[in-house]
Image: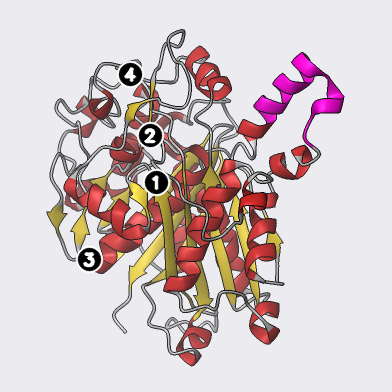
Amino acid sequence: MSDPRGNGVRRVVVTGLGLVTALGQGVAATWAGLVAGRSGVRRITGFDTSLFASRIAAEVPDLDPSGVLDRKDLRRTDRYTQLALVAAREAMDGAGLPARLEGELALRTGAIVGTGLGGGITFAEQAGVLAERGPDRMSPFFVPMVIPNLAAGQVAMSFGPLGPNFSVSSACATGGHALGEAWETIRRGDAEVMIAGSTEAGVHPVFVGGFAAMRALSTRNDEPARASRPFDRGRDGFVIGEGAGVVVLEELDHARGRGVEPLAELVGYGASADAGHVTLPSPGGVGALRAIRRALDKAGLEPADIEHVNAHATSTPEGDRTELEMIRSLFGDGAGEVSVTANKSMLGHTLGAAGAIEAIATVLALRHGVVPPTVNLEDPDDAAAGLDLTPGVARERPIRVALSNSFGFGGQNSALVFRRWDG
């Protein structure tokens, strides 16, 4: 079926979702936690934090990858890959895809799975082995465990897709870029189905220490659940998290041919660069605005069509203020009519995984007609005056079109526009 605007562009729908987050393993667990306003931020359990300024994180509890990897392969894969495989399997199951793809379906299915850090935990651990015990004691699986394309590669090896297969890495914009580039792959006819998403496992002393050295992390250690505070005056930095989000994107007629009911339609994708500061966004969010306007242009929509924004909203002072300014610039006098939510208030900042996880939350908001809350928003920033940031409690609201924003260090921006599927 061609695009309803009559330009012949292939339509792309979401047919499967998979999540692993600090709120649990599986879409249902994460969505229930988000709607309930439950925080996944806790004291770090994986290592001794006594010397660290920030001692809290949004760790995935009780990860069980045994359904996708046997005991031998568990020892040969980094945690970031394990998270991706668990989420990918759930998304494929939800889309009604077989355990392993074969024949024409395999040939016409690809995978783009991004990450910001790759196998950073393995890298740090093996660097220690090198320093303490010498190169002969390093793992022979070190390189394939560390390189950032292996999550996508392992999806193919585990589940069989033979189409386009690669990773993207754009810091905290990674997930949005992965979904967007998968969307473009289907639109141009290089695949009928794409397994797309992002994954991150960075709760490790090296990364916690590194981000703390930048003064980027919250130090509200005595109140973990209240530490991530997007848009609140009391915000003092982000809370590092881990997780993965994967979707199955599919050309509409292909999905119909399989008898699969779409969950939503991805109608727009935009990307841009700030070309400014290493960590700070461009003043007024003008770079992000360019990405959003490109996404809207591809979708054939105007800002007034957007009813809900899943904000990037990391809980950093400058980043949140700039995003609020950007929202005002985008929507003008209608800014107060748009429902905004900040999932990182509960999930922490999952870095490269954030864009895909939050895109899935956006799809679920469209499907269920519920906007999850922004928790810990007790004293809104002056820049938030008059905006609907969904403080504290989820709100029922029928939504037809929603925007998911993701912005990364280096000034890399991605924007995704989803439309509710009404059949």
Q: Nearer the viewer, residue 62 or 333?
A: 62
Q: Quadrant of residue 421?
A: bottom left
Q: Which mark is residue 236?
A: 4
Residue located 56% across and 74% down the image: 99
Residue range (magenta): 123-139
Q: Is residue 369 magenta?
A: no
- Of badges 3 and 1, nearer the viewer stands 1
As drawn, the residue found furthest toward the right would be 136
Residue type at the position of mark 4: Asp
The residue to which callout 2 is attached is 58
Residue located 60% across and 48% down the image: 81
- Of badges 1 and 4, nearer the viewer stands 1
Residue type at the position of mark 3: His
Q: Is residue 23 above or below residue 228?
A: below
Q: How far separated are the C-alphas under marks 3 and 4?
A: 33 Å
User: Dot 3: few (<14), some (14–19), or many (≥20) neighbours within 10 Å?
Assistant: few
* Side of 102 relative to 83 (left or right): right
Report the predominant secondary structure element of the magenta stretch: helix
Q: Which mark is residue 368?
A: 3
Q: Nearer the viewer, residue 190 or 110?
A: 110
Residue type at the position of mark 2: Ala
Q: Quadrant of residue 22?
A: top left
Residue 118's spot in the image, x, y percent? 64, 40
Residue 89's spot in the image, x, y percent? 51, 64
Q: Is residue 96 above or below residue 394?
A: below
User: What SS does tag 1 mark?
Assistant: strand
Residue 11's spot in the image, x, y percent? 49, 78
Residue located 14% across and 39% down the image: 392
The residue to which callout 1 is attached is 21
Asked if the residue at tag 1 contacts the one at tag 3, i.e. Cβ–Cβ closer than 8 Å, the answer is: no
